[in-house]
Image (spheres, rainbow, N blue to C red):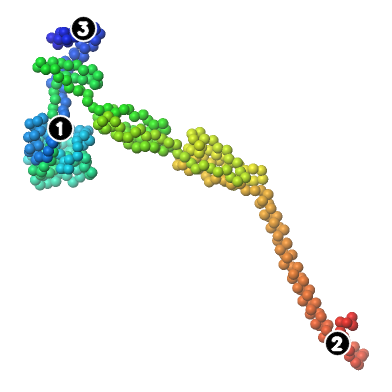
Amino acid sequence: GVCVEIFARQKHCQIQKCVIHFWLLVLFYELAIWEGVHSWNYNFSPNDMTWPDARKYCQKSFTDMVAIQNSEENNYLNAMLPKNPSYYWIGIRRIHNVWTWVGTNKTLTREAENWAKGEPTDGSEDCVEIYIKRGNDTGMWNNDPCGKMKRAICYLVVTENVWRLLEVIRVDVLKDSTEQSVNLLNIMKCKVLKIPRNGTRNCSHPIGDFSYLSTCDFGCVEGFLLNGSVSLQCEGSGAWSSPIPDCEVMKCKVLKIPRNGTRNCSHPIGDFSYHSACDFGCVEGFLLNGSVSLQCEGSGAWSSPIPDCEGILQEQHKYTKLIFIAPGAACLISVPFVIWLIKHYRKKDIERYQSVKLCPETVSKCEDVTLNDF
């Protein structure tokens, strides 16, 4: 009956197109035998209310208060709901001293717990709120008195034997004379992020590849520096939180040519950047003092200090000066001393001879002797 209906609705279609529709319908019919496709939508109340009133609101307008199944769902709610100063009620309540999901009447397991630090507390705080977009403990739970006023988070279960596959093929099936359709795949996708040149990329996909809540962390190999955000997240709009970063080569300081020296550099990546190498030498008559070759390292520093050139003749001249200066200095010191010494002894002799009287033993009369007599 279903096949006849499809062919009746598409009398003018081509044979190939009809065959494709036929096999798709067979697939969907087999799936429809199991209670259909289960999907749900989230909603929240426009105003604050007590927990009991929040439960009534959700049951009247939707299915029930939200029952969070996993951390991905918890993160989704935190990302999509607007901030409310008093936060939101969720479908957990302490019943007979046991934390219970009210929609399913199932006990909250330890694996599913997402309490904030120090929670839950004892006392009459039997209802649970979720911190949406809070500065601390965002997305986590806290138990509070059920009479406090907060917004309600509700969910609506949808069960239909109508599918949309990969957001391309739409097949409509009549049910109770009403044609309806439900999106099977409705996760927002983001563009696949390429790995930067000379970089690394590490991604996590809690829901689907490069889809909502996917996160990618970026880095660079040795000798390169990341330019941009370290981490990007796929947002609900289908766009990444920041542009894709790139990796820039690490630069080193430009090396000057030594005085009376030479420099020969090679730059495989960029001028005076990572892996650049410079060889040094000296002109004739000078010797290199330092490393012959320097390389720009990944840290942005050169492997050794810049060398310099020392003159060979200049060094020899230093020793020559010392050789000649030493005796010269001795001469400068000794000549005045010799002159002073000669004058000193000459003066002594003059004084001695002036006071001498020649008295020959054979002469009875003494005569004074002066220098004029000589």
User: Badge 3 is on which residue?
Assistant: 12
Picture quadrant of residue 339: bottom right
Q: Can residue 168 be seen in the rendering of this structure?
A: yes
Quadrant showing the C terminus: bottom right
Q: Secondary structure at mark 3?
A: loop
Q: Which mark is residue 295?
A: none
**Residue 196, position as x, y percentages in the image:** 39, 31
Say whether residue 83 is left or right of residue 315.
Answer: left
**Residue 325, position as x, y percentages in the image:** 70, 60
Q: Is residue 197 above or below residue 20?
A: below
Say whether residue 338 is left or right of residue 107.
Answer: right
Picture quadrant of residue 343: bottom right
* Numbered disc in front, either 1 or 2: 1
Q: CA distance from mark 1 to mark 3?
A: 43 Å
Determine the residue positioned at 32% across, 35% down: 242
Q: CA distance from mark 1 to mark 2?
A: 146 Å
Sequence-earlier tag: 2 or 3: 3
Picture quadrant of residue 152: top left
Sequence-earlier tag: 1 or 3: 3
**Residue 182, position as x, y percentages in the image:** 17, 22
Amino acid at pointer 3: His
* Numbered disc in front, either 1 or 3: 3
Q: Is residue 8 above or below residue 103?
A: above
User: Badge 2 is on which residue?
Assistant: 357
User: Badge 1 is on which residue?
Assistant: 43
Q: Residues within 10 Å of mark 3 (few under 14, many from 20)?
A: few
